[in-house]
Amino acid sequence: MAHRNLRTADYPTQARVRLGKAVGQARRAVGHRFRASFADEAGIGIRSLESLERGEPTVGVTVVELVCRALSRHLHGWDASTAESILDGGPVPTHDLIDPDQPRRIALDIMWAKARSDLTTVIDSGAGAEVYPRKLEHWRRRFLRAGLDEAAVLRVSREAQQAAARDDQQT
């Protein structure tokens, strides 16, 4: 467990930057190319993650611990006290993945969510008959390039239609 009063402001700039770099590299190693998906997984705001990765002095113990816990689900050597160790000059854990297939699954999950959201937006906009087939083809090509099959394209299309129907029922 990290020190209860851990604040990045209590450490020199060089130590904070070192921690931020380690967190950013670890985030990317587990498959989160963008901060938004990792911030969501960690249960923090994007701005908090940006502050941590940029070495800003405004990051408190809760954000640090949540980020370390999220990384510990994917990487050996990370736990709630890892950040404090890095700030104190200790070693940065390697990017030894607990599940080597995790980065690919995360990337596919993110692509799936984007496709569902994109297709739902088209349906909700009322431009479906003109735009939907083109959007669906766009996502079909992306899914096939990523190694998914036609059935996955149909499932995400069905999910988008169901989400749009729920949106209609709620309004």
Image: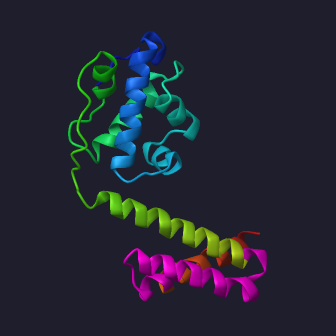
Residue visible at 26% across and 61% down in the picture:
101
Q: Quadrant of residue 70?
A: top left
Q: Is 145 one of the magenta-colored residues? A: yes
> Relative to 61, is 148 above or below?
below
Q: Quadrant of the C terminus?
A: bottom right
Q: Quadrant of residue 130?
A: bottom right
Decide if residue 39 is on the left or right side of residue 98: right
Residue visible at 44% across and 48% down in the picture:
41
Q: For residue 92, say whether it is visible.
A: yes
Decide if residue 164 is on the left or right side of residue 82: right
**Magenta span covers which residues?**
124-153
Q: Nearer the viewer, residue 109 or 61?
A: 109
- Place of residue 103 in the rendered image (x, y in percent of width and height, measured from the top left): 34, 57
- Place of residue 43 in the rendered image (x, y in percent of width and height, measured from the top left): 47, 42
Decide if residue 146 is on the left or right side of residue 123: left
Q: For residue 7, say whether it is visible.
A: no
- Place of residue 96 in the rendered image (x, y in percent of width and height, measured from the top left): 21, 45
Q: Quadrant of the N terminus?
A: top left
Type of secondary structure dominating the magenta stretch: helix
Q: Is 7 one of the magenta-colored residues? A: no
Residue visible at 56% across and 66% down in the picture:
114
> Relative to 144, is 44 above or below?
above
- Place of residue 106 in the rendered image (x, y in percent of width and height, measured from the top left): 39, 60
